[in-house]
Image (tube, helix red, strand yellow):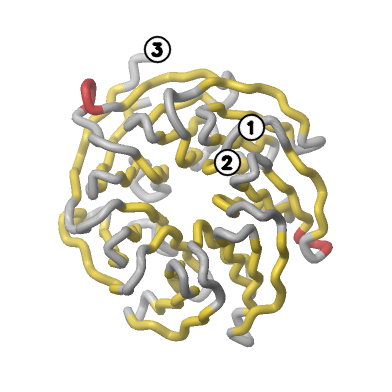
Amino acid sequence: MSKIQVNKLHTLTGHNDCIYALAEGPDPRFFYTGAGDGMVVEWDLDHPKDGKLVAKLPHSVYALAVDPIRNWLIIGHNFEGIHVIDLQENKELWSLNITDQAIFHINVLGDEILVGTGDGVLTVVDIQKKAVRKHIKLSSKSIRVMDVALKKMHLAIGLSDHSVKILDLTQDFKPIANLTGHTNSVFALSYSPDEQLLISGARDAHLKFWNTDSYSLSENIIAHMYAINYLSFREDGDYFVTCSMDKSIKVWDTKEQKLLKVIDKARNAGHGTSINKVIWSTYSHDVISVSDDRTISIWNLEL
C-alpha cells in the first residue's frame, strides 16, 4: 500500500436521515446532497460549514444531476418524478410526474434528461417540451446507475439484473452490448476521462474493468468486503475512488488497477456506516463522501 497522506478536512452535518445523493454543481465550487429526509442542500467548498437548503420534498431523494448549460439542478423525487431547480434564482422552474417508482439515477444530455427507475425503465424527458419523449424498458429489475461517454456517445447502464447495458446515443438508444459477469446488482459505473475504460462495481464487491473498444473484460478484482456503492475518477483519470457498504473508501491506481489506500473509521475517523456516494471534486481536488450516518466528509489526499 502506498504512502498516501489522508487528511480529513471537514465533517458536515444537517441532514436528518441517510444521505444517498451527491452531485458536483455547474460551478464546481458547490456540491449538492439529497437524503432520506427529502432535503436537498447546497454546500460551498470555500465555506463548507454553511449548508443552504435548496428543496424540501415529501419523499426521499436518491438521485441528483446538474445541467451545466442552463445552471439547473435536477432532483429525482422518489415515487413521483423530477423537479428542476434554477440555481441562479434558487427556485423551482418546473416538475414532471413520471413514475411511482424509486429514481436511482439521472443524467442530463443536451436537451434531454435521462431518468432510470426501479422498474427497469429508462425515461427520456424532452427539456424544451417539458414532456416525456419515450420510455425504454430495459429489464424487470431496477436501473441503478448510468454514465455517458460523450465522445463515443455511448450510454452505460448498470442494473439490478446484474448486467451492464451499453446503448448508442447516436441511434436513439439502440443496444450495442450487454455486459455480464457480476453476480449481483451493479451500483457503480464510470467511464474513464479518456473513455478507453469502463469500470463497474456491484453488490458482489467486485470491480470489473471493460475495454471500451470491444467492451471485453480486461480485469476483475475483489475490491471490498461488501457492496460497492459508487466510484469516481480524478479529473486526469490517473486515480479513482470507490465507496462501499463496508464503511470504507478505497483509492486506486487506474493504469496499474491497484489498490493504493484504504480510508476507514479505524485509521482515519471515517464514516461509521455504509458510504453511499463519493466524488472527486474538480474544484478543490478533494474527495467528498456521504453516508448512512447522515454526515458528509471532505478528504484531502496527498498523492
Q: Mark 2 and mark 1 in contact? Answer it, CB < 8 Å.
A: yes
Residue 133 location (% of width, % of height): 70, 78
**Residue 186's mark?**
2
| Above or below: residue 282 compared with residue 32 | above
Specify the quadrant of the image occupied by residue 211. Answer: top right
Q: On residue 182, which mark appears?
A: 1
**Which one is closest to the eye, mark 3 or mark 2?**
2
Give the amino acid at mark 2: Val
Report the residue marked by disc 3: 1
Residue shown at 18%/44% (left/top)? 11
The disc labelled 1 sits on which kind of residue?
His
Check disc 3 and report its element: helix, strand or loop. loop
Q: Is residue 77 visible?
A: yes
Quarter of the picture holding the N terminus: top left
Looking at marks 3 and 2 on the same chain, the residue that comes earlier in the sequence is marked by 3
In the picture, measured across the screen, residue 252 lies left or right of residue 218, that is left
Three-letter amino acid code of the residue under disc 3: Met
Mark 1 falls on what kind of element?
loop
Q: In the rendered view, does 251 fall on the left or right side of 97?
A: left
Q: Position of residue 252 (x, y in %)?
A: 48, 25
Give the mark nearest the N terminus, 3 or 1.
Answer: 3
Q: Is residue 71 visible?
A: no
Quarter-of-image position of residue 22 = bottom left
Which residue sits furthest front?
A: 140
Residue at 82% across, 49% down: 176
Using the numbered discs, state the Cα–Cα distance from disc 2 to disc 1 in whole angstroms: 7 Å
